[in-house]
Image (cartoon, grey):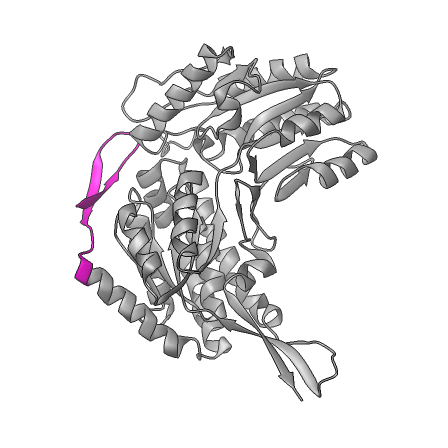
Amino acid sequence: MALASINPATGETLNTFHELTDQEQEAKVALAAAAFKTYRRTPLSDRRKWMTRAAEILEAEKDKFGRMITLEMGKPLADAIAEAAKCATACRYYVEHAETILAEQEIPTNASRSYIRFQPMGVVLAVMPWNFPFWQVFRFAAPALMAGNVGLLKHSSNVPQCALAIEDVLKRAGFPEGAFQTLLIGSARVASLLDDPRIAAATLTGSEPAGIQVAVGAAKNIKKTVLELGGSDPFIVMPSADLEKAVATGIKSRALNNGQSCINAKRFLASATIYSQFEKRFVEGMKALKVGDPLDPSTQVGPIATPHGAHELESQVKRAVENGAKVLCGGTRIAMAGNFFEPTVLGGVTPDNPVFREEIFGPVAMLFKVKDVDEAIELANDSPFGLGASAWTNDASERVRFIEELEAGLVFINGMVASDARLPFGGTKHSGYGRELGPYGILEFMNAKTVWIG
């Protein structure tokens, strides 16, 4: 089976790669297991040096990597370049903070000494998505490698060039052979990897069905997993909010990455007293977005990453309308080469509409009118997902309620939900479990060993 790199803006096949044979896959797993035995004992100073060099390579070659990202998955070039540069922030965060986070923690007991020692678990399998093909990988790789774990990357099959480039960055940075390897394989072979006793744990960012498969496969082998799955993030706007800023930020969030981010704002809940103004401005702003060639600096929304994704988006909008929703703008694929879809706004979506409980992965927003903060919280939480939430208000009591009551792994007040190397990232409910980034991200794949000395 060949893995293809296809430009979603043109449909052109850029390159093809042969999937690893069973023997080649076995060799890579064996190499990772052997590498861990020595890599886990490398001085932290060496890991710091290699990770710092990786950050330097990412920053120096961000333009090259950005173009690669755009050609493989279609995000606007400026955003792709920024993604490559952002990876360096994760590298530098763990260079600066790994020693402190992983330091032995003294616990007073009746022993002469008792403490917690953090030790790496081993080979960690990372199943990663195409939508942020560099950033998603580095937010796993940076903490895992700094902690003394080794990584095997099974990247999405439509971004093989990015997958190989990341392995090359870490090799050039100085990490030992086998510390981080890319596996060019299809999804069907993940199950056998989870069954392999040499693999200690797994992390996945992707769809809910993919997360279930990995969780089940790991559970039957009693292996630790971290899952970052889908989201249908609410974006709540109350009467005291800065309406102009809220509208602009909401549009930016919904269009970010061509609408293909788990933390895009997807459900927009505006107070009844300002709803008509919000709807008018929001629809006008979505209509004004420029869709086109992602290599064109003026483009704001590029193509959907795959033909399947564009078809699914079209199907969701159609089903929404069939079940009572109203198209306020957009609603159809654009008749041009590639997988382009109009920025779309839907109104009149009720909780019994099937799409209300689905993740919409593309530039399609749903608008809702709410009478007060109680209804806003109730509607925001009426979702199987619980990844991020953004609430806009200058009322102190409302802020407290949103922070306390919104069922989400991330709550942003008067700002757009975003990932940051310094802050834990992850969700609740069907959005997954465990955390990436921040101090918790490096501890997920560590054995917290209790030591008691009499």
- The quadrant in which residue 454 appears is bottom right
Q: Residue at x 64, y 35 (%)?
A: 390
User: As displayed, is residue 446 above or below residue 128?
Assistant: below
Residue 426 visible (yes or no): yes
Q: Is residue 166 visible?
A: no
Left or right, 230 with reference to 103: left
Q: Is residue 13 magenta?
A: yes
Q: In this picture, which residue range is highlighted in magenta?
A: 1-23
Expressed as whole percent of the image width and height from the top left, the position of residue 40 reads 43, 76
Q: Position of residue 410 (x, y in %)?
A: 62, 43
- Image-based side of 23 in relation to 43, left or right: left
Residue 416 is situated, as x and y percent measured from the top left of the image, at: 61, 37
Count of labels in the image: 0
Residue 202 position within the rendered picture, expressed as x and y whole percent measured from the top left: 42, 57
314 is higher (above) or lower (below) than 43: above
Quarter assignment of residue 283: top right
Indicate whether residue 244 is drawn in magenta.
Answer: no
Q: Is residue 302 above or below residue 49?
A: above
